[in-house]
Every structure is written in C-alpha cells, then in structure tokens.
Amino acid sequence: MSEPASSTEVEAAQPAASSHDTVEAAVRAQLTKAFGGLRGVLEAAVPTVGFTGAYLLTKELRLSLVVGVGAALVLLAIRLIQKSTPQFVVNSLFGIGIAAFFALRSGKAQDVFLPGILYNACYAAAMVLSILVRWPVVGFLIGSVTGDPTAWHRDPAIVRLCSRLTWLLLIPCLVRVAVQWPLYLAGEVGWLGASKLALGWPLQVAGLAAMVWLLARGRTPLPATEN
C-alpha cells in the first residue's frame, strides 16, 4: 500500500522525525493530519445529506444526484474563495461522483451507497491481510515520519503495537459493511443514508479515541533510520 518515499518526501519527513521521539507521538501526529476537524466532518456529510433528503422527498434519482454534487461544488467554491485547502471537499466530490456513476448506470438509488460499501469491505480485507503478514498498515505512518518506510518493521514491539492499532482502524469498516449491506440488498435508501452518517465520523471518532487511549499507555522509541 505504501510506495518508497522519494528524496523530496524523505527530506520533508525528517524534520517531523526530530519532533517525535516515540512511536505513539508519531502516530498521533499523523492521525491528526489525516482528518480535517469539524469542518472536514461537515464537508464529508453534506453531499450525503443533500442526496438522501432530496431522494426521500422527490424519489427522483437524477435530481437528487444534482443536489448532492451541487452541494459538494458549493463547498469547493467556498474553499477556493477562502484560499484554504480543498482536500477534504475534493475527496467528498470524488466520492459523490463515483456514487453518481454507479447509480446512473443501474438506475437504482441504493447504488449511490454501493461504492462506499465496497470500499470499506476492500479496505478492511487489505488491513486484515497486512496484519496476517505482519506488515500492518499503521506501521507505514511511522515510516512517513522517520523517512524510512520499513525501518519500523525490524522492531517486534512496534510491529505488535501497529497491529493492534490497525485492528482498531479496520473495525469501523467491518461494522459499516455488516450494517449497510443488508440495507443495500433491501433497497432502503433512507436507512442507508442515515447509517452512512451515523457510522461515518461518529464511528471513526470512536475508533480513533480507542487508538489514542492505546497510544497514551506506552512510550515505544522510534526506530533509528540508516543513512
């Protein structure tokens, strides 16, 4: 899942390494960067709320997709006007774009949620595989800080810690699939929209809180990088 860092990326990562002396501190810092705070949460939710609400009111698939995509475009325009990073809005727009493709191709409103279900299933499977082969994906967060993508793997204590963290990261994905797949098969568009919101950021925050709790318990030294 992780490509070797380029020389530019290594140079950019090395200053960060000097500010974190433990694995726990490094992972906390990288997790903070990965999420967009309250505004990122809202920007991710608005297109889903727009599509689901419009479909429940009108039962018109195309109109509902226009509402969802239009909401994402408005948020993107606001970001660009404010000259702030559009990363999380672009992610949201990309997601609703793929969802629209699936739904328009089949003509079924529930297919708006199929890409997300498939994504969570594949993501969870990839993370389980990474744990089984003892290359847990969270370990690559360590590599992004130290500038060496694989040095962490030489320390069994770090591998064990990253395996536990990866389990905590993948559990929300499994829960989403377990809840949303039966709703998808039943064509319950309203419940799919509600479950996507309820099992999105609230569940992710719970998982991250568990990770923070685990990280707060230890002080595992960062692996030394080789020149």
Image (cartoon, rainbow, N blue to C red):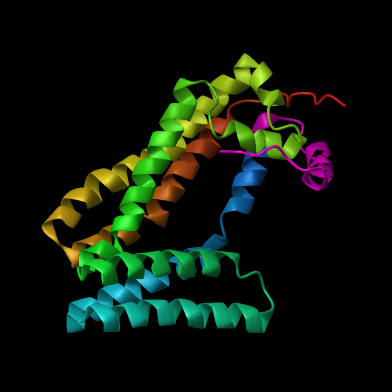
Is residue 171 shown above or below 189? above
Residue 114 versus residue 43 in the image, above or below: above
Left or right placement of residue 19 versus residue 66 in this view:
right
Q: Is residue 194 visible?
A: yes
| Residue closer to the observer: 126 or 143 | 126
In front of the other: 219 or 11 = 11
Q: Residue at x 70, y 39 (%)?
A: 144
For this view, does 115 lie left or right of residue 156?
Answer: left
Q: Position of residue 6 (x, y in %)?
A: 77, 43
- Quadrant (top left, top right, bottom left, bottom right) of the C terminus: top right
Q: Is residue 172 shown in magenta?
A: no
Q: Quadrant of residue 151?
A: top right
Q: Is residue 129 left or right of residue 190?
A: right
Give coordinates of residue 217: x percent, y percent. Answer: 58, 28
- Is residue 25 in view from this perspective? no
Residue at (67, 73) in percent of width and height: 84
Direction from residue 65 to residue 82 in the image, left or right: right
Name of the residue lying farthest toward the top:
156
Residue 117, compared with residue 100, is above or below; it is above
Q: Residue furthest right?
A: 227
What count of labels does the image hold?
A: 0
Is 13 in the magenta?
Answer: yes
Q: Quadrant of the N terminus?
A: top right
Residue ID at (47%, 70%): 93
Q: From the top left corner, tell me how far across and down residue 196 is, in percent.
A: 31, 59
Q: Which residues are magenta?
A: 1-24
